[in-house]
């Protein structure tokens, strides 16, 4: 990407605005929304870097606002245990072409949406309120969540599904949002630094300028999401978000499937 065209700038701005809007409402989802869409307008490594760096911008604003609610113990343990998976994911991503990354992202999204739909239905039946503090951070399940989150982040800049699936069961809404956005900020910071070190050619000056210019879209998405976050029915909105993610997942799989069978 030597020169920034208006079409590309507008496309990235729209993606950034929408992804920030979703993250403000749910406390997660920036990478889930942004990365599959960015893969349609940027080379794979730049799309992954852009998704992570832009997510850091949005997470820093929201995380600062909710900093007193963060479960720092969980964030620290998730980050530390996830380092081996993160390093492995970054190395493996260098051997995967753009088509394979799109396909993997599509599979992750579809699997995640199906899982969350099942969770929504079961929680609606149980009507159970999460109880904080009952997460065993030394259990095999917690270790697998942290490792797989790091691996997915290194591979496809999507660390959210395992962590969200674990924490949503145990934390109240505000604590969940504060903890996830803080975790994503530091997870993306670690991964971005490692990817820039390994794939130096992907982070060019024009690309860096483009990302800085996306700050406006992040701010607008954050501001636009605030009133909806307070008023919208959470269960209905989650269904809408999962529906959109499912469509993006199917779209991301289209090209790899065509290349595989046609």
Image (spheres, rainbow, N blue to C red):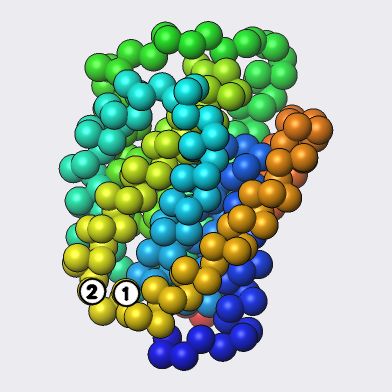
Question: Foreground: 134 or 196?
Answer: 196
The residue that mark 1 highlights is 203
Residue 83 location in percent, x, y?
21, 42
Question: Foreground: 152 or 131?
Answer: 131
Residue 57 location in percent, x, y?
48, 53
Q: Residue at x 44, y 51 (%)?
A: 56
Q: Are marks 2 and 1 in contact (CB under 8 Å)?
A: yes
Residue 130 location in percent, x, y?
57, 13
Residue 162 visible in the snapshot: no
Q: Secondary structure at mark 1?
A: loop
The residue that mark 2 highlights is 200
Residue 227 location in percent, x, y?
77, 40
Mark 2, Cα crowd under 10 Å, few <14 / some 14-19 / many 20+, is: few
- The disc placed on residue 194 is none
Question: Foreground: 47 or 247?
Answer: 47
Mark 1, Cα crowd under 10 Å, few <14 / some 14-19 / many 20+, is: some
- The residues tagged by marks 2 and 1 sit, at their Cα atoms, a distance apart of 6 Å
Q: Is residue 119 above or below residue 188?
A: above
Q: Residue at x 32, y 74 (%)?
A: 203
Name which quarter of the figure residue 34 lies in.
bottom right
Question: How many badges with numbers are in the image?
Answer: 2
Q: Quadrant location of the N terminus?
A: bottom left
Residue 2 visible in the snapshot: yes
Q: Residue at x 25, y 17 (%)?
A: 138
Q: Secondary structure at mark 2?
A: helix
Q: Residue at x 60, y 64 (%)?
A: 216
């Amino acid at each position: 990407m030597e020169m920034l065209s208006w079409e590309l700038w507008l496309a990235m701005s729209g993606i950034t605005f929408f992804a920030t809007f979703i993250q403000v409402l749910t406390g997660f989802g920036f990478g889930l929304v942004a990365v599959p869409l960015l893969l349609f307008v940027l080379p794979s490594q730049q799309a992954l870097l852009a998704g992570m760096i832009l997510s850091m911008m949005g997470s820093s604003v929201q995380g600062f606002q909710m900093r007193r609610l963060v479960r720092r113990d969980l964030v620290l343990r998730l980050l530390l245990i996830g380092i081996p998976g993160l390093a492995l994911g970054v190395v493996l991503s260098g051997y995967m072409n753009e088509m394979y990354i799109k396909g993997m992202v599509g599979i992750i999204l579809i699997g995640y949406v199906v899982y969350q739909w099942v969770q929504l239905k079961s929680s609606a039946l149980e009507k159970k309120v999460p109880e904080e503090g009952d997460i065993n951070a030394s259990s095999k399940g917690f270790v697998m969540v942290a490792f797989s989150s790091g691996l997915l982040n290194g591979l496809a800049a999507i660390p959210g599904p395992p962590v969200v699936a674990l924490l949503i069961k145990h934390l109240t809404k505000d604590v969940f949002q504060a903890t996830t956005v803080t975790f994503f900020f530091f997870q993306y910071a670690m991964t971005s630094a490692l990817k820039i070190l390994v794939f130096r050619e992907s982070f060019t000056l024009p690309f860096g300028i483009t990302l800085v210019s996306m700050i406006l879209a992040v701010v607008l998405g954050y501001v636009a999401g605030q009133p909806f976050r307070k008023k919208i029915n959470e269960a209905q909105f989650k269904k809408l978000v999962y529906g959109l993610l499912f469509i993006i997942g199917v779209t991301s799989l289209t090209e790899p499937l065509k290349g595989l069978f046609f």
